[in-house]
């Protein structure tokens, strides 16, 4: 008698197991639960693979359609049935966003999913092989370069946490088969049927026709993987060049050095400079226009590019990448903070930690009665020679860019400025 064959592992569970085994160091799993078939499949499979219930289901409530409240309630019930408690996060998409409703909703969704995430936490989404094929086609139709054509990576850093797609190599048909085999219940987002959205048009009208003639899902996934390899090689070639263009601080470049590079290379260098800092670059058209402005700007001009909570700005021959205070919600407070008596350090709301050693280096040896505050305008700072100098002039002499001056911690005692932590 021929030996019986061991049944092949279920693709969904096998993909999830492989992902979790590949990244054993990740912390809490923040599962994006839309209530649709794919995310319900992911959470159900995760409940089977993760008996310790490390997962935290999160539903982002966009309010984009009349069934949004019912969708959120459904997610709560599904999560509870699998042994979890779902947290609902509400976001509001602007009526006419510049980037389009799809892109704006996606950006706000990921921002909400990452909110309050701890270091090492991982956001899990239920994207699978069919989604990867759609993303590749969308990027190609937008005229994207290698980074766009690389589509979605299996794992990437987002802020201090991670974004993982454990089912990215699982065929769409396997997701559907899993849902049917386990009699799962899900709710269809009515916007998924709206062919005004490009992704829906590709999913319902284009990919089914391609699949009738080609193994499109698999081949487009392979093409995306090859583009990801191209991006990796390109980054490896650009990084040494960027290191040679380093400016006076980690988040800036030598502007003239950048403009001495060949024209065809500049946008790639600038894009890599932005992504290396953990930010998403703007569209290529805007990047090229900004480079043109940099090249043609008068010596006293200060071209700037602003997008999605980030900015590129020029100051004294250096090009700076900034995260806007408005985007982070970490604008320096006006009132300041009292240094705790006997404390070795002071924690600021934006994450900075000031130490007693830094105070000593600034000439403040006695911390009693010390208060840390920020610039209001018109201040004069007492120097070691006993004279008071204009704080504005001192900042200009030190080459501190205008947008950083409001964040420099100032040391005050009895209403008089006695020091500044310039490097902060």
Image (cartoon, rainbow, N blue to C red):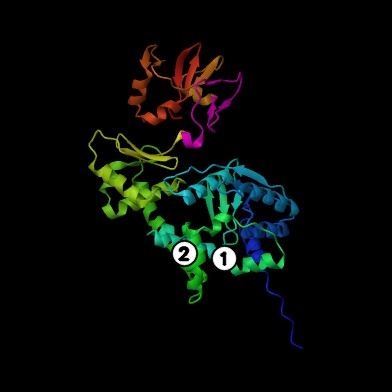
Left or right of 395 on screen, residue 411: right
Indicate the position of residue 19 as horizontal and vertical percent values.
62, 60
Q: Is residue 222 magenta?
A: no
Q: Tell me what residue is drawn at x 63 percent, y 64 percent.
A: 15
Q: Tell me what residue is drawn at x 46 percent, y 33 percent.
A: 325
SS assignment at label 2: helix
State whether residue 174 is above or below residue 413: below
- When asked about the image quadrant of residue 296, the answer is top left
Q: Is residue 411 in view from this perspective?
A: yes
Closer to us: 333 or 389: 333
The residue carrying pointer 1 sits among few (fewer than 14), some (14 to 19) or many (20 or more) residues within 10 Å by Cα, namely: some
Most extreme residue toward the right is 1
Indicate the position of residue 384 as horizontal and vertical percent values.
41, 15
Badge number at residue 169: 1
The CA span between labels 2 and 1 is: 12 Å
Say which quadrant the N terminus sits in.
bottom right
The main secondary structure of the magenta stretch is loop
Closer to us: 24 or 47: 47
The residue carrying pointer 2 sits among few (fewer than 14), some (14 to 19) or many (20 or more) residues within 10 Å by Cα, namely: many
Q: Tell me what residue is drawn at x 57 percent, y 44 percent.
A: 112
State whether residue 359 is above or below residue 261: above
Residue, disc 2? 224
Closer to us: 395 or 97: 97
Badge number at residue 206: none
Q: Is residue 154 in view from this perspective?
A: no
Answer with mark 2 or mark 1, whichever residue precedes in sequence.
Answer: 1
The residues colored magenta run 326-355
Most extreme residue toward the bottom is 1
């Amino acid at each position: 008698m021929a030996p019986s064959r061991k049944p092949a592992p279920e693709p969904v569970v096998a993909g999830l197991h492989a992902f979790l085994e590949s990244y054993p160091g990740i912390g809490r799993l923040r599962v994006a639960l839309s209530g649709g078939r794919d995310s319900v499949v992911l959470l159900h499979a995760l409940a089977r693979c993760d008996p310790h219930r490390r997962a935290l289901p999160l539903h982002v409530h966009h309010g984009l359609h009349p069934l949004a409240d019912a969708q959120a309630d459904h997610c709560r019930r599904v999560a509870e049935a699998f042994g979890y408690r779902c947290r609902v996060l509400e976001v509001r998409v602007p009526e006419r966003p510049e980037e389009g409703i799809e892109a704006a909703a996606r950006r706000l969704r990921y921002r909400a999913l990452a909110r309050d995430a701890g270091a090492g936490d991982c956001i899990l989404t239920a994207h699978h092989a069919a989604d990867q094929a759609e993303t590749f086609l969308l990027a190609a139709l937008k005229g994207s370069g290698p980074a766009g054509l690389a589509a979605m990576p299996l794992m990437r850093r987002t802020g201090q946490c991670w974004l993982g797609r454990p089912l990215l190599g699982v065929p769409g048909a396997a997701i559907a088969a899993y849902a049917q085999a386990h009699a799962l219940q899900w709710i269809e987002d009515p916007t998924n049927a709206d062919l005004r959205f490009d992704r829906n048009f590709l999913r319902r009208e284009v990919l089914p026709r391609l699949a009738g003639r080609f193994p499109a899902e698999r081949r487009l996934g392979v093409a995306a993987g090859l583009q990801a390899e191209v991006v990796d090689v390109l980054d490896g070639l650009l990084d040494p060049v960027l290191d040679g263009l380093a400016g006076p601080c980690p988040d800036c470049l030598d502007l003239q050095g950048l403009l001495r590079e060949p024209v065809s290379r500049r946008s790639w260098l600038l894009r890599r400079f932005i992504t290396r800092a953990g930010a998403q670059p703007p569209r290529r058209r805007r990047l090229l226009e900004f480079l043109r402005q940099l090249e043609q700007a008068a010596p006293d001009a200060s071209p700037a590019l602003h997008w999605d909570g980030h900015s590129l700005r020029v100051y004294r021959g250096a090009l700076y990448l900034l995260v806007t205070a408005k985007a982070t919600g970490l604008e320096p407070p006006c009132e300041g903070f009292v240094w705790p008596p006997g404390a070795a350090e002071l924690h600021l709301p934006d994450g900075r930690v000031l130490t007693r050693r830094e105070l000593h280096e600034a000439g403040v040896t006695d911390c009693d009665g010390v208060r840390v505050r920020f610039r209001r305008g018109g201040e004069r700072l007492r120097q070691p020679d006993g004279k008071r100098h204009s704080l504005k002039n001192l900042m200009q002499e030190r080459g501190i860019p205008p947008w950083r001056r409001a964040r420099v911690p100032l040391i005050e005692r009895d209403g008089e400025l006695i020091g500044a932590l310039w490097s902060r």
